[in-house]
């Protein structure tokens, strides 16, 4: 039955209901004129819905719409804001209508009678009331529903014998808790006012405050009844009072009191009605009535303006009351403009797709025309150029037709958050920003589920309950910010909550418990990467994890969905302050920017999303592909980048295994490469890992229209689709993830995911190359450079033969290298550089005439080339002999002695005593030079540290790794072992543990570039006595002295 | 044409005559420039751009394991309707005439051997009929794409 005739109706109705819902939610915070506008908008759409459904014969829909319309009608024309419970009911009606619209075929069978009844009862009460501002109650008749209710109360009998204890109405009003049902309270207050007035027999025009309190103690029902009867001309006002008490939860001592009053009033009412025989009480079975009672629990009274509800009404008691429903819909909804409708038109998506294809085809024709006409004749050329521009504009316009504002998607969330908040007992404010940002329809549709999930998560797990929030000093109302922003051809959607955040330690603990990561691995990952582990399937499905991490099941599904959209997802969180989830999705799936590359003659499009940079492999240039085991690598600055050749990926059908990789290595042996061949490495990032894709040529970038792969070829993972190129040929679009997977290329961790990466591979250093005199080139590892200042020689001051310059407000000694080293002097020019070394406490700077460059290289330090105490060694860098300067030597030359130890006294004594048992105390025989074993795989560091030690009078033996170290330990005796951690063959941890297992008592000092904070505990577990960071000379020397138990100057 | 008769679009490949029901065919084009698709089975020749629509081109000779050598390059692409399968076509050497075959003719040829390579997929062949000069092998184009999918999945499972 649901055929195309109705599809328009369904579409339109959906839109109507959306407008309706939006308006209803906006009502909750609208004021004054906005209310009227919103009611009007709602009324119009419901009216159309009613009309349409009636016309098409969907009578159930029509009925419900009609009942809804009736209620709205009452509030039209600035007649006040519908109270919350009415809005609630209207929302229910919307839900029901939506359900019926989505299931038109069965809309007739929907049972809407209960809902209709509720709507009608509200409507009935409403029509029987006057605006609150008008205090005279000339009502035509008591609400019909009152009588059966009273009767039911009567029938329960339980309350009959009760007397009023004491009802001080004024007191009650002020003590009322303050749930959001203001309106209800006001109705109650008003009614009470009437009752009270009736009781004291005050005239209509006396204000409430003058009435004073009424002591009803000991007053029996009949007394009350009589008093009421005596003082009121009509029973109507009395009856109204009853309305109040149907919300038992609003009263701390609840039902009985309410019932008593009801009962009393009922008596009064019945007494009154005796004299008005037309108001006979119809007999009603009490069980049904009780049911009804709970449904028609509250009767509305309009609040004409905010003045009626003074803010002082909010009493401290508010917290105990069930206040769970403050959900605010957005900052402010845009006015619902009915004229929009006139300028829009519904078009089938198929037609748009076809338009897209045709425009693409037109582009091809244009390109061909451009080629065909060339530059022979001026006239056609001009025409072609116009064709050109028109085509481009057309393409743009057609693309735009697919774009929709994200507001269309966001629109559903206020309702969701509102309902969820109520359900969970949380107060949530949803702020939406950037609803006008446009996204492709398909992207928008596919974002729906992930976003819903994420917002649910934020509400459920992210935000705390109001009391918890207040305990930690936050506002009770939790805030979720949903924002959209367009940037770089992408849309960035952020879901931020100000909740409890994710506890990184809990995540760590769980990762270890689940065996996803080891402790060692965890030490190296950044918080961002840590949070991204939440997205791992194994993680999120583990139930207990979601409890501690605060993130629920299914995050991996969200991630997969987003990635399917060519998008990405990142999580950031500050414990205690909230979590932010950032989605990046492309504006459209139809067009993506790609790099066009070639392999042989074939062109391929590589999406630029994951592209970080392109490296040109020029035979004359410096980088080249290197080989390591079964992988090809490229040394990209400070990291080793695994390289995959696109050619190999294309030619080999099956996922690369070890044998394939080995074969590839043989096939790609360097000898085969022709010397004039230029190749490119695309540095790509996928899933936080980087790898290089080697391609033949890069033709440029192009925005390509993506066509999906043929359904029968979906199994081919290395392609994401196909596209038509300017010449009408088809090119395939590479799927970076698929290629990485196919090539079994795990890639290196990207630099930001492990900040220590650059320091890890021991033999690779970033060094600074500089010149002083005209002849030599000097070098200093960047880790030893604090910074470089540009100085003008005019600022230099001379004191004797020493020169100073003020840097950072400190007089800094300038080092002229030729004065301390056997190197050439420098012609002073007016502008020079001053290199400020790290790990030197005294203010000194090395004068530099020219900064050559920085470079990353494996230093092959040659020690004996230049005999100079201030030169650590030499290395050939860029074909030139470079002298590595010993900054500590210069410092000593300038400032003489070394500074005092920096290690704390506490550490000193403890360590010393601990290890001095069972071996000779070295302080007892200072004549013998202490013997130190230095284990480090890096020649450079070995040399530097060795010199540090020799300078303080130690006898140093070196070893290149843990295994070498163990051998040395076996053959010689040492007073101290200083070991690097990151080493090949056997690392420092293993070395130390092995040594301790053999019963070695020698103190061990870990010397590493790993962060002390994170590794100190591990170091002590492994048996290290101390832990120092590399190259901090003073600390190191201090610690060594400490461990050896030698005082400064003992051995010198 | 009576209800007894069927029309077949015929085409040649490796010197043999094949046919498919004419109602399955959308069009026949001379555009045969293919962009190869690495990792796809042998019989997939690649994508062809037909007025902005990308069509998957299959090679009939490779599908049926017919001899490839000494063959002229495929000159025509037979594109099937959407109901047969999504956006695909068959590369053939030459297009032949429309053949009309009656039910009784088919019945008379029941059991006639196709003479196609035995290791080729037999499910592609629907019926056979001896015409004046040639043996017409009627193919079932609906079986083509499943064959490819099958081939891809068996390969990936190895």
Image (cartoon, rainbow, N blue to C red):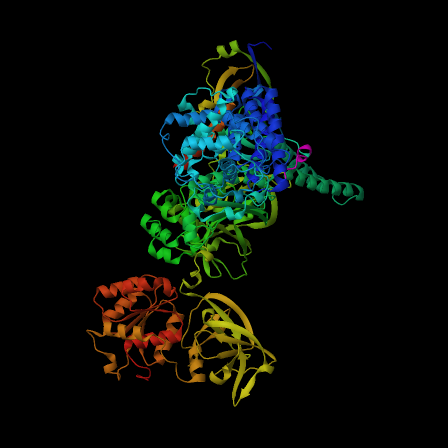
**Quadrant of image for the C terminus of chain A:** bottom left
Q: Position of residue A1015 (x, y in %)?
A: 35, 62
Magenta highlight on residue A337: yes
Which quadrant is home to the N terminus of chain A?
Answer: top right
> Among all residues in the image, which is located at the extreme bottom?
A800
The residue that appears at 54% across and 58% down in the rendered structure is A619
Residue ID at (49%, 26%): A272
Furthest toward the left, the residue is: A918
Q: Position of residue A19 (x, y in %)?
A: 59, 34
Q: What span is colored magenta in the figure?
A: A334-342
Which image quadrant for residue B55?
top right
Which residue is at the front of the view, B1 or A686? A686
Q: Quadrant of residue A1035?
A: bottom left
Relative vertical location of residue A431 with respect to residue A748 in this rendering, above or below:
above
Whether A57 is drawn above or below A309: the answer is: above
Residue A151 sits in which quadrant?
top left
User: Which sits in the foreground, B109 or B30?
Assistant: B30
Q: Is residue A983 visible?
A: no
């Amino acid at each position: 039955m649901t055929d195309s005739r109705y599809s328009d109706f369904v579409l339109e109705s959906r839109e109507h209901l959306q407008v309706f819902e939006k308006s209803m939610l906006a009502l909750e915070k609208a004021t004054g004129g906005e209310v009227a506008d919103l009611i009007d908008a709602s009324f119009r759409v419901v009216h159309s819905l009613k009309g349409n459904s009636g016309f098409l014969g969907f009578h159930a829909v029509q009925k419900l719409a009609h009942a809804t319309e009736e209620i709205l009608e009452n509030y039209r024309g600035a007649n006040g804001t519908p109270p919350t419970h009415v809005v609630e009911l209207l929302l229910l009606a919307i839900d029901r209508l939506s359900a019926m619209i989505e299931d038109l075929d069965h809309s007739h069978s929907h049972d809407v009678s209960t809902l209709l009844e509720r709507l009608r009862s509200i409507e009935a009460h409403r029509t029987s009331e006057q605006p609150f501002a008008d205090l005279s109650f000339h009502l035509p008749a008591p609400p019909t529903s009152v009588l059966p209710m009273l009767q039911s109360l009567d029938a329960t009998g339980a309350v009959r014998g009760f007397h009023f204890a004491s009802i001080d109405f004024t007191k009650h009003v002020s003590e009322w808790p303050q749930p959001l049902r203001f309106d209800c309270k006001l109705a109650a207050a008003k009614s009470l006012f009437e009752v009270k007035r009736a009781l004291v027999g005050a005239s209509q025009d006396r204000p409430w405050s003058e009435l004073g309190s009424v002591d009803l103690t000991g007053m029996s029902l009949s007394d009350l009844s009589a008093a009421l009867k005596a003082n009121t001309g009509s029973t109507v006002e009395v009856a109204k009072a009853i309305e109040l008490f149907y919300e038992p939860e609003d009263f701390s001592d609840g039902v009985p009191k309410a019932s008593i009053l009801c009962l009393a009033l009922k008596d009064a009412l019945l007494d009154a009605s005796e004299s008005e025989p037309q108001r006979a009480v119809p007999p009603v079975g009490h069980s049904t009535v009780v049911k009804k009672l709970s449904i028609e629990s509250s009767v509305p009274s309009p609040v004409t303006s905010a003045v009626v509800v003074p803010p002082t009404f909010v009493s401290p008691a508010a917290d105990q009351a069930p206040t769970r429903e403050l959900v605010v819909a957005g900052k402010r909804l845009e006015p619902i403009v009915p004229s929009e409708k006139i300028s829009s038109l519904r078009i089938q998506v198929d037609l748009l797709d076809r338009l897209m294809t045709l425009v693409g085809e037109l582009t091809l024709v244009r390109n061909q025309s451009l080629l065909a006409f060339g530059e022979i004749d001026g006239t056609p050329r001009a025409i072609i150029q116009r064709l050109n521009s028109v085509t481009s504009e057309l393409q743009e316009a057609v693309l735009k037709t697919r774009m929709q504002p994200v507001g269309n998607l966001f629109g559903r969330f206020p309702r969701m958050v509102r309902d969820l908040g109520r359900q969970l007992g949380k107060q949530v404010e949803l702020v939406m920003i950037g609803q006008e940002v446009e996204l492709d329809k398909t992207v928008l549709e596919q974002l729906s589920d992930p976003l819903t999930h994420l917002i649910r998560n934020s509400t459920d797990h992210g935000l705390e309950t109001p009391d918890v929030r207040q305990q930690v000093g936050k506002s009770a109302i939790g805030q979720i910010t949903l924002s959209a922003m367009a940037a770089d051809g992408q849309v960035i959607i952020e879901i931020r909550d100000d909740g409890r955040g994710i506890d990184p330690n809990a995540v760590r603990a769980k990762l270890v418990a689940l065996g996803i990561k080891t402790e060692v691995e965890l030490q190296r990952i950044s918080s961002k990467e840590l949070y991204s582990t939440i997205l791992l399937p194994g993680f999120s499905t583990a139930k207990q994890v979601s409890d501690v991490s605060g993130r629920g099941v299914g995050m991996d599904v969200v991630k997969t969905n987003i990635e399917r959209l060519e998008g990405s997802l990142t999580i950031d969180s500050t414990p205690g302050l909230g979590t932010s989830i950032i989605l990046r999705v492309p504006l459209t799936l139809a067009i993506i920017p790609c790099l066009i590359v070639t392999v042989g003659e074939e062109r391929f499009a590589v999406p630029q999303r994951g592209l970080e940079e392109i490296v040109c492999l020029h035979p004359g240039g410096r980088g080249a592909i290197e080989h390591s085991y079964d992988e090809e690598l490229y040394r990209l600055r400070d990291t080793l980048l695994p390289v995959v050749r696109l050619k190999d990926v294309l030619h080999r059908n099956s996922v690369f295994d070890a044998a394939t990789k080995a074969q590839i290595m043989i096939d790609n042996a360097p000898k085969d490469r022709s010397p004039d061949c230029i190749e490119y490495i695309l540095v790509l990032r996928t899933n936080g890992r980087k790898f290089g894709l080697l391609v033949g040529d890069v033709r440029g970038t192009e925005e390509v229209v993506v066509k999906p792969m043929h359904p029968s070829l979906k199994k081919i993972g290395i392609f994401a689709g196909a596209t038509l190129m300017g010449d009408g040929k088809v090119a395939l679009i590479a799927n970076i993830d698929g290629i990485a997977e196919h090539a079994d290329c795990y890639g290196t961790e990207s630099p930001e995911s492990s900040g220590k990466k650059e320091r890890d591979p021991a033999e690779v250093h970033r060094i600074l190359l500089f010149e002083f005199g005209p002849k030599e080139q000097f070098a200093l590892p960047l880790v030893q450079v604090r910074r470089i200042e540009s100085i003008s020689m005019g600022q230099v001051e001379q004191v004797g033969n020493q020169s100073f310059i003020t840097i950072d407000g400190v007089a800094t000694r300038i080092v002229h290298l030729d004065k301390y080293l056997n190197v050439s002097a420098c012609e002073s020019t007016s502008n020079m550089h001053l290199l400020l070394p790290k790990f030197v406490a005294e203010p000194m700077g090395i004068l530099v005439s020219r900064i050559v460059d920085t470079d990353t290289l494996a230093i092959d330090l040659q020690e004996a080339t230049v005999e100079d105490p201030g030169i650590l060694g030499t290395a050939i860098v860029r074909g030139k002999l470079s002298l590595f300067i010993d900054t500590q030597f210069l410092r000593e030359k300038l400032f003489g002695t070394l500074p005092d130890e920096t290690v704390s006294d506490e550490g000193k004594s403890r360590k010393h005593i601990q290890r001095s048992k069972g071996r000779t105390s070295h302080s007892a025989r200072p004549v013998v030079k202490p013997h130190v074993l230095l284990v480090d795989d890096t020649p450079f560091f070995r040399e530097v540290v060795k010199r540090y030690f020799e300078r303080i009078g130690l006898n140093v033996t070196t070893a290149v790794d843990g295994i070498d170290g163990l051998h040395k330990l076996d053959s010689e005796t040492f007073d101290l072992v200083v070991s690097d951690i990151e080493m090949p063959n056997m690392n420092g941890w293993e070395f130390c543990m092995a040594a301790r297992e053999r019963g070695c008592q020698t103190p061990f000092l870990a010397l590493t570039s790993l962060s002390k904070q994170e590794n100190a505990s591990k170091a002590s577990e492994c048996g290290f006595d101390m832990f120092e960071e590399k190259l901090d000379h003073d600390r190191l020397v201090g610690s060594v002295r400490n461990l050896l138990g030698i005082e400064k100057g003992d051995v010198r | 044409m009576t209800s007894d008769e069927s029309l077949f679009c015929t085409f040649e490949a490796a010197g043999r005559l094949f046919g498919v029901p004419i109602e399955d065919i959308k069009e026949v084009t001379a555009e045969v420039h293919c962009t190869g698709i690495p990792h796809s089975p042998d019989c997939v020749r690649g994508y062809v751009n037909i007025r902005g629509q990308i069509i998957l081109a299959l090679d009939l000779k490779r599908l049926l394991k017919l001899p490839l050598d000494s063959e002229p390059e495929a000159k025509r692409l037979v594109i099937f309707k959407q109901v047969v399968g999504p956006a695909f076509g068959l590369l053939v050497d030459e297009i032949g005439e429309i053949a009309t075959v009656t039910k009784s003719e088919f019945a008379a040829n029941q059991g006639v051997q196709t003479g196609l390579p035995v290791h080729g997929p037999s499910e592609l062949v629907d019926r056979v009929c001896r015409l004046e000069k040639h043996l017409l092998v009627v193919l079932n184009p609906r079986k083509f794409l499943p064959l490819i999918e099958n081939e891809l999945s068996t390969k990936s499972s190895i």
